Amino acid sequence: MSVWNYVVTAHKPTNVTHSCVGNFTSPQELNLIIAKCTRIEIHLLTAHGLQPMLDVPIYGRIATLELFRPHGEPQDFLFISTERYKFCVLQWDPDTSELITRAMGDVSDRIGRPTDNGQIGLIDPDCRLIGLHLYDGLFKVIPFDNKGQLKEAFNIRLHKMFGPCMSALTKQLEELQVLDIKFLYGCSRPTIVVLYQDNKDARHVKTYEVVLKDKDFVEGPWSQNNLDNGAGLLIPVPMPLGGVIIIGEETIVYCNGTIFKAIPIRPSITRAYGRVDADGSRYLLGDNAGLIHLLVITHERERVNGLKIEHLGETTVASTISYLDNAVVYVGSSYGDSQLCSVLIKLNLQPDAKGSYVEVLEAYVNLGPIVDFCVVDLERQGQGQVVTCSGAYKDGSLRIVRNGIGINEQASVELQGIKGLWSLRSSINDPYDSLLVVSFISETRVLAMNMDDELEESEIEGFSAEEQTLFCQNAIHDQLVQVTATVVRLVSSTTRQLLHEWNAPSGYSVNVATANASQVLLATGGGHLVYLEIEKEKLIEVKHIQLEYEISCLDINPIGENPNYTTVAAVGMWTDLTVRIFSLPSLELLTKENLGGEIIPRSILQCTFEGVSYLLCTLGDGHLLNFLLDINTGGLSNRKKVSLGTQPITLRTFSSKDTTHVFAASDRPTVIYSSNKKLLYSNVNLKEVSHMCPFNSAAFPDSLAIAKEGELSIGTIDDIQKLHIRTIPLGQHARRICHQEQSRTFSICCFKNCQISNEETEMHFIRLLDDQTFEFMSIFPLDSYEYGCSIISCSFSDDNNAYYCVGTAYVLPEENEPSKGRILVFAVEDGKLQLIVEKETKGAVYSLNAFNGKLLAAINQKIQLYKWTLREDGSRELQTECGHHGHILALYVQTRGDFIVVGDLMKSISLLLYKHEEGAIEELARDYNANWMSAVEILDDDVFVGAENNYNLFTVRKNSDAASDEERGRLEVVGEYHLGEFVNRFRHGSLVMRLPDSEVGNIPTIIFGTINGVIGVIASLPHDQYVFFEKLQANLVKVIKGVGGLSHEQWRSFNNEKRTADARNFLDGDLIESFLDLSRSRMDDIATSMGVTLEELCKRVEELTRLH
């Protein structure tokens, strides 16, 4: 039964909705703060670009994001308001690097109609008040106290909605449709300027002064009537110029009551602006075609005498523009990848060959809006990849999203029985590796790159080739070290001759060894630990101690200041199963940590991620322990344990893009890396790997050498991230996608905007793409005004061929709802789309489904079933069999067996049944709630999930066993949850390889895609698991407080215009998985209150993280 569901984000929102720049983390630091609908990111501007400092979820959809500086404060505060009428003021705490709440509250009203144009939030430049336009005709004011500070608002515990410094007052605006409101600069009283449209569709600007003591407006100093009919954006200009810029579709106007200046512009809709100079004399404007302009106010002696506009270049379509510094600009986008651009202003620099002054320094992937997607296993490895229709307009693209890190194989050779791999350079300062040492059970072979960039057998005369190498390494003074069971050899890396050797004591052999450029540490039988130092042409035995047990693993990877020397050594022990930290050169014991359990440590590594030192230790059963390591005292703290596989793991460091990561080779190879000071684990898309070493050669830069079953391969590694995203730019807007296994193709419905005799029109196409190369193979243009609405791949009864079926609609300007459309059936022949059959319909074909060897179509209000028939002349046709009326608009249809689930425009979900004998479709049951649906899917035979336009998810169940017909005819709502995201599509499938041995191997999942670029997973849990994690969620809510004091319970409660209800039968996976990021002491407290061991709790939460 799929009633108990776990909802988790596999890919966070990437749509940038707001951004602002200021001194938030310290008075000297410049920060860029970005809002991505339900998350905020804080970045620091450095000489090397943007450095992320914090990325946190907000329990709300962000409506306003503004920085402001109250009187007497050295740095900025952050004001956030949400779409559900909560607000908070946040301050940065430099000691903990966290956000603290200075004020919070609820600004909702019981009466009032929410604004059509979205919320507007604004802060008086002199910090006297915050204004909010939330409901039609009302302006809400939150005043500051007379010191201009929010200090008293700390009394949050008194359970007052605001601190004692604030009372909210609400004032009626007489205007009709408010388009924009801003505060003016340099006014003795707080003064707002309002752009509005009257009931004759004319647009005007008016100013008002806010009189706080009377809680009222008085007429402001000036107004301006009858502006450009497309006027939509106000830009207040700072002093000394003052006044306001009004951006229209065809003109830009500056006015301040005494001066009025206007200039014409090329027709466009300006979506975003960014102020360049503090005095407000220059602004960057971004329009709906992705063009960036510079608007300059020319002035003399603080008096404006004109406006000038200059075209700079093209970026993605901007939703927000923030000017950072030194001509560097952040362009946030909701339609394409956000960009960090260098805008080169014409006054001092020249344009490029295309005449553009814009140079993209960095692009940030944005999957949004995900209009449609499909789940395919292109590499046939049992791992799903999601192919999305992303972006909009000219930024439209396909994105291939897959879990884990790909290794792109460059070369391979068959080699059996590899026991170890090391890469060597010809001198210590050589940037590239030139040799690969491969160790076997009774020999060592050396491979070198030849002139043709091929690996061939070579030799190092000073090495022992007749025995297994335990370790080898480049050493100082252009030397090489080789450790075998009997001897440590020091060899010249230039002449390759033996320089010196150290022999194991007679009767003892070396079992494990490790080295760095100037030190060697090895262990022989009997628990002997020997420390050697490397000098020019000699090895010196510095210290030798005997431990009480045998030694299983060692590491002396340098993690301090000196890259060639370390003062601490890590040792793993048999028998007592401990990890010990010794100081070097004295081999004095600093720390002894019991690992517990019965499994021995097999590999140990000390390493540094993002300036934090860790000790990683793997056990023989595939578990990894990580500790924080204090390199001065050898102290170990903050122990955490994760399961990476089931076999022993070997750890090696490697570099990618100048950052160090760790590769864990085992039956489930994993890359360990750090982001925001948090260790992350990403699986590598390879089957079992036994050994790995970095191999950065001239021919294969930044590559890895990998030993797998029977072969040695060299490959480059993808960007280190959990999800790997590949972009296929289309330059047009893809709306629907479908994959066909038989022809190995994708087919998409897409459109692009074209200029035809000064008229902008949309041209719609069906395109065919190769599913490996993603090259365009074929194109089928649709008629004028014809839109592609739905597409599927299917085959019919008595016909084994696979077809693409496309549903279309003729969208005519004079019609409210399409009155005709077509169903087109294509075959792929010789890589081309061949139209086999077309069928006219009396409406838009919103959905198509393969159904019992027939074709089921949703056409406007009707569900229609067609059968595939053979005419006498041998041609095919679609023939109407039966249908079902009774919907407002049947937009989304899913089928299973003879059942049909319909998501309606406004009548929620209904369940239909096809009866073979009667050849008829009947309604079995429906949900009588009024939900405006955006997607539906069938979870199992009885439970269906829906998403609706207020960002909620809900599940309904059919009551087959109910006693009365009335109850059987009602779909019972069994689960409700506020996702906070607009879902466009659900699909069955999984982003990860399902391993049958794991607990989550047989948990069914569906994937969803949203407007904000979120890819999420809904997993249907067994009831006992659900109950366990529900208890964990309740414990976590008490421990993890929402940013700004926002409530998790309120955020996840189902909410639409009519009602609000607590979430039920859905769990917040993002909250549950954040348990793994808590400190050890908090984890312990939660495990105690759950009544399970911490290890068991971590294991169960980690299992869930493997769902995505």
Image (cartoon, grey):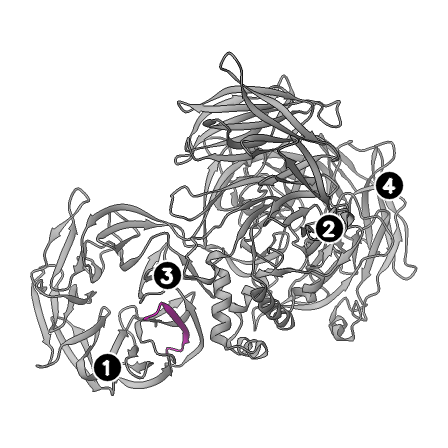
Q: Which mark is residue 255?
A: none
Q: Position of residue 332 (x, y in %)?
A: 58, 46
In magenta segment, residue 1076: no
Mark 2: amino acid:
Met
Mark 3: amino acid:
His
Kindly state the secondary structure of the residue where label 4 is placed.
loop
Q: Which mark is residue 176?
A: 4
Query: Which residue occupies 77% across, 57% down?
Result: 1060
Measure the C-alpha gap from mark 3 to mark 4.
59 Å
Q: Tag 2 or tag 4, which sits nearer the N-term?
A: 4
Residue 420 visible in the picture: yes
Q: Which residue is mark 1?
A: 550
Name above or below for residue 434 compared with residue 542.
above
Tell me if label 2 and label 3 are in contact, CB under 8 Å: no
Residue 699 visible in the picture: no
Residue 318 lies left or right of residue 641; in this view the side is right
Kindly state the secondary structure of the residue where label 2 is placed.
loop
Label tally: 4
Tell me if label 1 and label 3 are in contact, CB under 8 Å: no
Query: Which residue occupies 20% across, 65% down?
Result: 473
Q: Which residues are magenta?
A: 620-631
Q: Bin the neighbour count of mark 1 within 10 Å (Cα to Cα): few under 14, some 14-19, many 20 and up.
A: many
